[in-house]
């Protein structure tokens, strides 16, 4: 099946990276699906997120289906102290794989969005990811083995009007991941940056975007794990590939204009809501 890891895939992952994996953003979406695929591959898991109930439900599901250990860490990764607490709590675990999938988006006009929301997103998408990538990069390099997965996006490759800052945070992730792939390879560490297109998860509602035709998390998680240790960057999912290859001959400025049209359609409901609110005052 396209959305399942083969026996050989599962065996390769567990042999290469050991028994313990850590996944941030495990409460929903791609992170949650990666947890399921890793548990089926017999990884013990440390699942990290803000929503305790969602994590407990995932823990119960994985314990019922697979004979693995699943530990929960509740953490708001926009807070430095909680990022460092996560590192402290997991320092004694023999973690060989870290999937840094925590992140979220904002949309609409950048200057109309609250600055606090934009800075909070920057802390989660970039600052926390950088701290954890630095930490696990060092741990894995000292052990001369390990795997690190970073979550970029299809919007990592150009500016995106009406998702300006979100796209900028994902451009940062892609640039960092591409470079770390080469820096850490001599130390036995595999680094993969995944750049998926629209995914049906909690992302769209939190970012206040209406996304039609989005892919399922299963379409994304399996290709990511299949590619770990083989590639530096992956465009997971058929829709991602179609969108990317359709734009491959378009100059960067043209891609920005195309993405402007796409995001205008995804966020046009915001203007209607603002107009209603203005008229109601």
Image: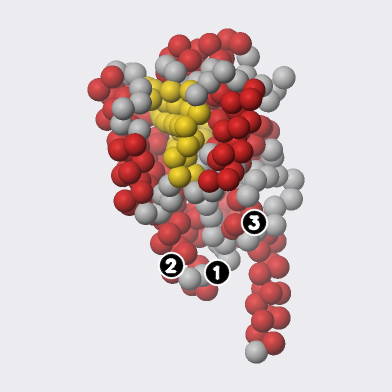
Q: Residue at x 50, y 55 (%)?
A: 166
Binning the other alpha carbons within 10 Å of mark 1 as few (below 14), some (14 to 19) or many (20 upward) gives some
User: Marks 1 and 3, Cα distance to the nearest angstrom?
Assistant: 17 Å
Binning the other alpha carbons within 10 Å of mark 3 as few (below 14), some (14 to 19) or many (20 upward) gives few
As drawn, the label of residue 109 is 1
Q: Which one is earlier in the sequence, the residue at label 2 or at label 3? A: 2
As drawn, the label of residue 116 is 2
Q: Nearer the viewer, mark 1 or mark 3?
A: 3
Could you tell me which quadrant the C terminus lies in? bottom right
Binning the other alpha carbons within 10 Å of mark 2 as few (below 14), some (14 to 19) or many (20 upward) gives few
Residue 188 image-quadrant placement: top left
Residue reaching furthest to the bottom: 281
Residue 196 image-quadrant placement: top right
Q: Which one is earlier in the sequence, the residue at label 1 or at label 2? A: 1
Q: How many marks?
A: 3
Q: Are marks 2 and 3 in contact (CB under 8 Å)?
A: no
Q: Residue 275, percent across and down?
A: 68, 80
User: Marks 1 and 2, Cα distance to the nearest angstrom?
Assistant: 14 Å
Helix, strand or loop at label 2? It is helix
User: Marks 2 and 3, Cα distance to the nearest angstrom?
Assistant: 19 Å
Front residue of this view, candidates 61 and 153 = 61
Q: Residue 49, percent across and down?
A: 49, 44
Vertical relation: 19 (above or below) 22: above
Vertical relation: 10 (above or below) 203: above
Q: Which residue is mark 3?
A: 205
Q: Residue 69, percent across and down?
A: 50, 24
Helix, strand or loop at label 1? It is loop
Q: Residue at x 43, y 47 (%)?
A: 75
Helix, strand or loop at label 3? It is helix
Q: Residue at x 35, y 33 (%)?
A: 90
């Amino acid at each position: 099946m396209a959305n399942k890891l083969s026996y050989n895939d599962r065996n390769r992952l567990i042999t290469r990276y050991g028994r313990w994996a850590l996944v941030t953003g495990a409460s929903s979406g791609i992170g949650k699906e990666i947890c399921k695929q890793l548990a089926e591959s017999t990884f013990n898991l440390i699942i990290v997120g803000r929503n305790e109930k969602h994590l407990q439900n995932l823990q119960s599901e994985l314990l019922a289906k697979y004979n693995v250990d699943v530990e929960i860490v509740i953490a708001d990764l926009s807070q430095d102290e909680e990022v460092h607490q996560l590192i402290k709590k997991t320092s004694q675990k023999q973690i060989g794989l870290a999937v840094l999938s925590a992140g979220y988006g904002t949309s609409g006009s950048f200057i109309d969005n609250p600055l606090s929301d934009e800075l909070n997103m920057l802390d989660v998408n970039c600052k926390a990811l950088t701290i954890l990538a630095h930490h696990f990069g060092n741990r894995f390099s000292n052990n001369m083995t390990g795997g690190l997965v970073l979550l970029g996006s299809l919007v990592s490759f150009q500016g995106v009007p009406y998702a300006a800052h979100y796209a900028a945070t994902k451009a940062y992730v892609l640039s960092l991941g591409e470079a770390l792939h080469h820096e850490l390879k001599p130390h036995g560490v595999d680094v993969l940056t995944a750049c998926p297109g629209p995914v049906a998860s909690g992302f769209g509602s939190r970012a206040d975007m209406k996304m039609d035709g989005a892919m399922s998390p299963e379409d994304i998680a399996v290709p990511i794990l299949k590619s770990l240790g083989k590639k530096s960057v992956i465009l997971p999912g058929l829709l991602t590939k179609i969108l990317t290859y359709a734009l491959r001959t378009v100059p960067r400025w043209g891609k920005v204009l195309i993405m402007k049209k796409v995001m205008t359609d995804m966020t046009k409901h915001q203007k209607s809501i603002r107009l209603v609110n203005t008229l109601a005052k």
